[in-house]
Image (spheres, rainbow, N blue to C red):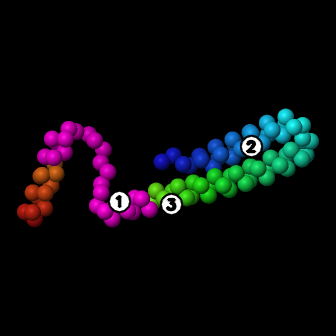
């Protein structure tokens, strides 16, 4: 999954919105920069925390799927080819 850029996108979006609102409300530059810096730091932290939780949940789901024996495969051939491969694999396990 492409979650690497999630904190940056969230941070920049929040910074853009905060900048537009503060410009429309005619904040002083010094006060605007302080508020913008705090906004960027807070939203970067929240984005990193959100990405961490998503990665943790994904890892737990993968472990659960492996424990249940489910395998996710790419569909490369027809159903007949897949059934034939499974039959061959089952036959090899029995003879060994």
Residue at 69%, 46% in the rendered image:
11
Residue at 30%, 48% in the rendered image:
73
What is the C-alpha distance between the residues marked 3 and 1?
14 Å
As helix, strand or loop, the secondary structure at mark 3 comes to helix
User: Which quadrant: the C terminus?
Assistant: bottom left
Image: magenta residue range: 60-84
Q: Residues within 10 Å of mark 2 (few under 14, many from 20)?
A: many
Any magenta on residue 82? yes
State the image coordinates of residue 44 (x, y, percent, origin top left). Answer: 68, 52
Residue at 64%, 43% in the rendered image:
9
As helix, strand or loop, the secondary structure at mark 1 comes to helix
Residue on which the image places disc 3? 56
Quadrant in which residue 53 is drawn: bottom right
Side of 18 relative to 7 (left or right): right
Side of 51 relative to 68 (left or right): right
Residue on which the image places disc 2? 15
Q: Nearer the viewer, residue 96 or 66?
A: 66
Residue on which the image places disc 1? 65
Any magenta on residue 51? no
């Amino acid at each position: 999954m492409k979650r690497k850029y999630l904190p940056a996108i969230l941070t920049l979006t929040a910074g853009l919105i905060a900048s537009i609102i503060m410009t429309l409300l005619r904040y002083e530059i010094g006060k605007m920069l302080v508020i913008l810096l705090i906004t960027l730091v807070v939203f970067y932290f929240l984005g990193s925390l959100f990405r961490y939780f998503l990665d943790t949940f994904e890892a737990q789901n993968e472990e659960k799927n492996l424990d249940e024996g489910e395998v996710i495969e790419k569909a490369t051939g027809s159903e007949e080819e897949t059934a034939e491969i499974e039959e061959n694999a089952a036959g090899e396990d029995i003879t060994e």
